[in-house]
Amino acid sequence: MRFFEDIAIGQRREIGTYTFTAESIKTFAAKFDPQRFHLDEEEGKNSLFGGLAASGWHVGSACMSLLVADGQHLAREAVSRGEEVAVWGPSPGFRDLRWIRPVLAGDTVNYVSEVVDKRTSASRPGWGILTVRTTGTNERGEEVYSITATAFVPLRKG
């Protein structure tokens, strides 16, 4: 992971893709969002979604999983180069969570993050606050998901 000083506003990073299969949609929904249009193809087809739709929470969870995996990948690369790895702090929250279009069974969503703001923390010396907008776009080029999140990122020591 990168240190605060190594990150620039406007930086973009492809996080990865996730394909929402009918099975994964139903499995997630059965456990976390058991609404009819997430559990049954016919109910989904007859809903406003027009097909078996992934829960918005599933779309967001897939994004989070890919973000964590990408961070782990970056850390492994840094270690292999002999670099110090920045250990990020927690996220103080997010805003502007949007489920823009339905994600239907068979859709593949590509997630991309862009740094939209950064500032040093006034209350936590040694830390910066990073603001990142992450979007998900389906294989038809339609934006289906977006979220703006913040995270504490350490500054380089001395």
Image (cartoon, rainbow, N blue to C red):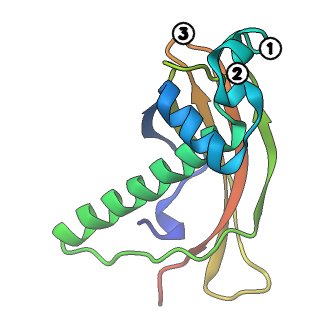
Mark whose residue sits in front, 2 or 3: 2
Tell me residue 47's x, y (percent). 80, 14
Residue kind at label 1, given as amino acid type: Ser
Can residue 10 be seen in this snapshot? no
Within 10 Å of disc 2 (Cα), the crowding (few <14, some 14-19, many 20+) is many
Work out whether mark 2 precedes mark 3 in sequence or the reverse, and give the earlier one: 2
Residue 72 visible to an observer of this rendering: yes
Q: Residue at x 59, y 77 (%)?
A: 89
Which badge, 1 or 2, is on the more N-terminal residue? 1
Eye-nearest disc, 3 or 1: 1
Q: Tell me where residue 74 appears, x and y as whole percent.
A: 34, 59
Mark sitting on residue 47: 1
Disc number lying in front (1 or 2): 1
* CA distance separating discs 1 and 2: 11 Å
Name the residue tied to disc 2.
102
In the picture, measured across the screen, residue 77 lies left or right of residue 156, that is left
Residue at horizontal 46 percent and vertical 63 percent from the top:
6
Q: Is residue 88 left or right of residue 35?
A: left
Q: CA distance from mark 2 to mark 3?
A: 12 Å
* Residue 46 picture quarter: top right
**Marks 1,2: beta carbons within 8 A:** no
Residue 122 vertical position relative to residue 66 in the rendered view, above or below: below
Marks 3 and 1, Cα distance to the nearest angstrom? 21 Å
- Which element carries disc 2, helix, strand or loop? loop
Query: Mark number for residue 140?
Result: 3
Task: Mark 2 and mark 3 in contact? Answer it, CB < 8 Å.
Answer: no
Q: Is residue 113 left or right of residue 125?
A: left
Q: Amino acid at mark 2?
A: Pro
> As shown in the figure, which amino acid type bears the numbered disc 3?
Arg
